[in-house]
Amino acid sequence: MKRFARYLPTFASLWITLLAAAKPPKLVVNIVVGSMRAGDIERYADGFGEGGFKRLLSGAVYAAGEYDFMQSSSPVTLATLSTGAMPSTHGVVTDYWFDYVDNRRVNLIEDRRYSGFGYPDSGGRISPVNLTAPTAGDALTAAWPDSRVVTVALEPQSAVVMGGLRGVCYWMEPSRAMWSSSTYYMLNLPHWVDDYNRERYGMSLISGSWSLSRRPALYKNRRRAVVELPKPGRDGEPVLRTVGIKGAADTQTAYDMLRLSPAGNDAVLDFAKRLLTKYSLGADAVPDMLNIVLDASRMVVESYGPESVEAEDMYYRLDDSLSDFLTYLFAQVSPEDVLVVLTAAHGSSPSYDVHPTPAERVNMRQAEVIVNGFLNARHGQGEWVTSVHDRSIWLNRNLIFSKGLNPADIQEEVATFTMQLRGVSHALSSAALRNGGFGTGYGRMMQNGFYPRRSGDVVLNLMPGCIEERDDRRSESGSMYGYDTRVPLIFYGHGISRSRHARHADMTSVAPTIASVLGILPPEACEGHVLEEILKK
């Protein structure tokens, strides 16, 4: 052992030398589809061209990337993807939660110390104030201070969580559908962004209607909401008809039409092209990173359902836009100097109404009333429930303490009681999740998604196929089931050889693998392991 210890400094020095000698990519591009199940690329491959998804399939492809926790919804999964850590470590467990001291609602990205650009009524006060774990982009700028890390998404939450603490983030301001940011990232919006917004390019993508982009016989899905499947005319040729985008008649806002149609993905990818050139990403030897989150795909799948013609056509149109983006990207930077990682934030449940008999849905507002009534009957009148949100129940701990009750006992009572609610499959109290050791099964996945300072007093999981009852959603994510947790995972470029891997890759592995390719240390809170097999040449 002593002899081995003598050589440790030599080994360490050799390892650092090897890392320095390895040429890192000039640019890492992370493309995150808002909602896409593992297998969807193969399912719809007949409708794809050669320059988009199929082009990336010539890289290293996993059967699935897998999120090993229950809260498989944005922004939780984006935080895991960017940090390489479980929610129990990175602390992003929902979009907002409640402070246990004063029952105050805490928004993940809201920060009144900063201002937005182009927002009416002082909106856009946004920063990564509540992110606790560094991202892969943060690790890159720590290792290479001159590196540029830029993130773009339709929704600010997606951009902020994916971008981390050190980079620059852009998103779309909803009232006028213009690209924006906040004073956390920059003193003023660049002039070229103002010019781009004046061009209104994103708005030119919105036609107010939606027609098929491929020949009708190609489509595998038949359920539809706004796209008419053609019927043969007198000459035997299909007759195409289109109707308005869902929600357009009600809201009449360009932003909603972008989110609910393929135009949203087009707008993000086009703006990403501007970011490539304006920030000179990949133009020198210092590695840069560009994060692209395609939120519109999530909205389309949730609104119309994964079995819909709209979802299928959205993927076909995304393939066209992706092909255009990749062509532009590789005209700026050689494929050998770019690492492209394509994956999804999560999958999606089946549509609740896909079968003749609709599946169970849970009314969370009703559940809140029922639980509060139960505690009233047990312990006296009061506002016992602060909120029921994102499959979690926050209790009024001040009221619990004022009555001399033990919070752990009340949590356990509520967990046991909620198991009687229709659609609920599992319920675990905060005390059980804090103190228990769940090595397998549903308990492990619920515990992996539990962060004591932010998670609710009781965490719920719903039956397979069961979702929350909402008028604007046919499907949603957020469960521990494979349709939510398994997503595509592809690494392409920078010398990565074509390969197929039958195993599922834990999504905590993405950030450390990117770090390994860059020759830097992984993010500080990273728990995942490098996918060594794709790095062997």
Image: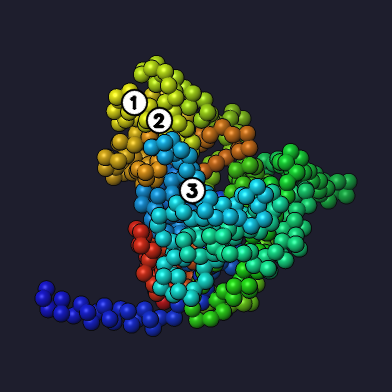
Looking at the rendered image, the quarter that the C terminus falls into is bottom left
User: Residue 164, labelled with which disc?
Assistant: none
Q: Nearer the viewer, residue 22 or 317?
A: 22
* Whether label 1 touches label 3, CB < 8 Å: no
Q: Amino acid at mark 3?
A: Leu
Q: Residues within 10 Å of mark 3 (few under 14, many from 20)?
A: many
- Element at label 3: loop
Q: Looking at the rendering, which quadrant does residue 80 occupy? A: bottom left
The x and y percentages for residue 72 are: 46, 46
Q: Amino acid at mark 1?
A: Ser
Furthest-right residue in this view:
234
User: Residue 402, labelled with which disc?
Assistant: 1
Label 1, label 2: how many angstroms apart (C-alpha)?
Answer: 10 Å
The x and y percentages for residue 8 are: 20, 77
- Element at label 2: loop
Q: Residues within 10 Å of mark 1 (few under 14, many from 20)?
A: few
Q: Nearer the viewer, residue 301 or 483?
A: 301
User: Residue 108, labelled with which disc?
Assistant: 3
Residue at 73% in and 46% down: 253
Label 2, label 3: how many angstroms apart (C-alpha)?
Answer: 20 Å
Residue at 78% in and 48% down: 208
Residue 253 visible? The answer is yes
- Side of 85 where 234 appears, left or right: right
Residue at 74% in and 38% down: 250
User: Residue 396, labelled with which disc?
Assistant: 2
Q: Amino acid at mark 2?
A: Asn
Mark 1 against mark 3, which lies toward the viewer? 1
- Side of 259 where 523 appears, left or right: left
